[in-house]
Image (spheres, rainbow, N blue to C red):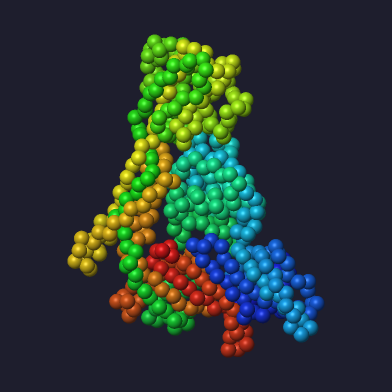
Amino acid sequence: MASQIQILFGGVDYTKYVDLESVSIQNNMVMTSDTGTVIVQLDGELSRPKCGQEFIWHTIDSVSGLELTRDFGGVAVTVQEDTYGTSLVYTITVKSYDHWFNRHLVVYWFNQYYAAGTKAQLLSLVPGDSANINNTVNNGNGDGIVNRIVENFCPGFTCNNVQAVSNTVIPQYFNYVTPSDAIKAIADQLEYGYYIDYYKDLHFYSFENFRSPLPNNTLDVDNDLVNYGDLEIIEDGQQTYNKVFLKGFKTRVSTPLLLTFLSDGSSQQWSLGYRVSSFKGDIAVAVFSSMSAYTADTTFQTTGVTTGGTQMTIARDIVDGAPGQASASNTAYIQYTQYLLRLPNYNGAGIMPTGKVIGVYFHYLKDVIYMGQDMQAQATIAAIEGTDGCYEYAVDDKSLTNSTIGAPQAKAQLLLQKYRLPQISGTFTSYLSGWRAGQSFQLVTTARMGGVNQRMYVLQVTKSIISNVDGTYVTMNQIQFANSPYLV
């Protein structure tokens, strides 16, 4: 099948006027924003490329014109004009689709929820939310905070490669931030990665496992004389941690606490003294006519549902209603981070009269240190070093504060997956089309590094176009890889 490189600006074919050897792209799965340059020379044949035009570099079938592989998709962000004789020469900087992804700012509150999840996961948290759940996860049966950010603030983008997450994230309030910053805040809680691909699709993942262009997805180092060259392999044990301590965060205490406050006819705000769990149903407030009425209501004291008082509706202070603004009747406004309860409008008549008893049932959040370790990795290192093989690491992370221990467990597991053993990494060149950061392949050799047979992840691809010996142009890819899908 004959193929050819094609360069498009705004859907128009500029290939004849592009200095193909000027085309260069940096594709990095950690930076999440690929950049590149291209030079176009014109003598009036076409209008000049403009900032904001879509830029596509792909390989097409020479006969049908159908796309075979896409090496870059993005947006022109700078255009510099120079002259060369009678020609006008344009040096264009291009950027990946995150330039369009971040056009609108996120202003939204998300309660404790799944970053992305199956429909069953989402409905377990909010049973009445089925009308708001869209089938936008790649498994076709759910969404989550990440998907809703894209749906509401990133028109034209999709979530086909957003992976479902098994644990929730804490409430998120985004106050005029870019979608990338909002998604990064969520990804950092989970030790997830994310990027926008060349088809305007969001990838949000723990590990990705897309196939590389290599035959059988294998780099056969000892026998393949065609598909790679200049292979360099490095083993690096400087950043090895196989026992991690996560601290600086809080998690939910399973046993509820009870507090009472006596109204004095003038107060409308009281201190809870503890950071309250914001998980749905973890705080309840009721107003009783007297202390004896409160004491007699054992149902409230065990479940938070009153049988002898007036149940208050729970709302978020500032977000759902602020001091000085009109407040809903019989609504308890909770300031979760300041540990405050506000009752400004009792029975629709304003401040609560003297002599009422306010009962509060809640689960609080306590400071926790979570430890995770990989005993197998410690044993492997111990056999080499003659030590106990244990390398410890501690990190403070307030973002792990949650009503469950799932987020710290997930972060500890992912840190161990990153750093449990010395990392094998390396570089090579390849002229195959279709290389992309985030792919993986099997590296197999008996002659190099004492023998290697491991899954490797493509971390960075530098793409450029060079002239082949027969005068045609081919794409040269410089590949950086490692046996962990992280640069560090």
State which quarter of the image contains the N terminus: bottom right
Nearest the viewer among 430 and 267 is 267
The residue depicted at 70 percent of the width and 70 percent of the height is: 79
State which quarter of the image contains the C terminus: bottom left
Q: In this view, does 265 lie to the left or right of 246?
A: right
Res 77 visible:
yes
When asked about the image quadrant of residue 67, the answer is bottom right
The residue depicted at 32 percent of the width and 62 percent of the height is: 240
Residue 309 spot, x, y in % from top left: 46, 15
When asked about the image quadrant of residue 416, the answer is bottom left
Residue 255 spot, x, y in % from top left: 34, 29
Q: How many marks?
A: 0
Q: In this view, does 122 lie above or below 450?
A: above
Nearest the viewer among 17 and 394 is 394
Residue 319 spot, x, y in % from top left: 57, 34
Nearest the viewer among 165 and 99 is 99
Q: In this view, does 350 lie to the left or right of 458?
A: right
Task: Spot the residue most to the bottom.
Answer: 469
Q: Is residue 485 above or below residue 305?
A: below
Residue 229 spot, x, y in % from top left: 45, 81
Task: Spot the residue most to the front.
Answer: 266
Q: Is residue 19 above or below residue 379?
A: below
When asked about the image quadrant of residue 386, the answer is bottom left
The residue depicted at 51 percent of the width and 66 percent of the height is: 28
Task: Spot the residue most to the right.
Answer: 44
The residue depicted at 32 percent of the width and 46 percent of the height is: 370
Task: Spot the residue most to the left.
Answer: 386
Res 433 visible:
no
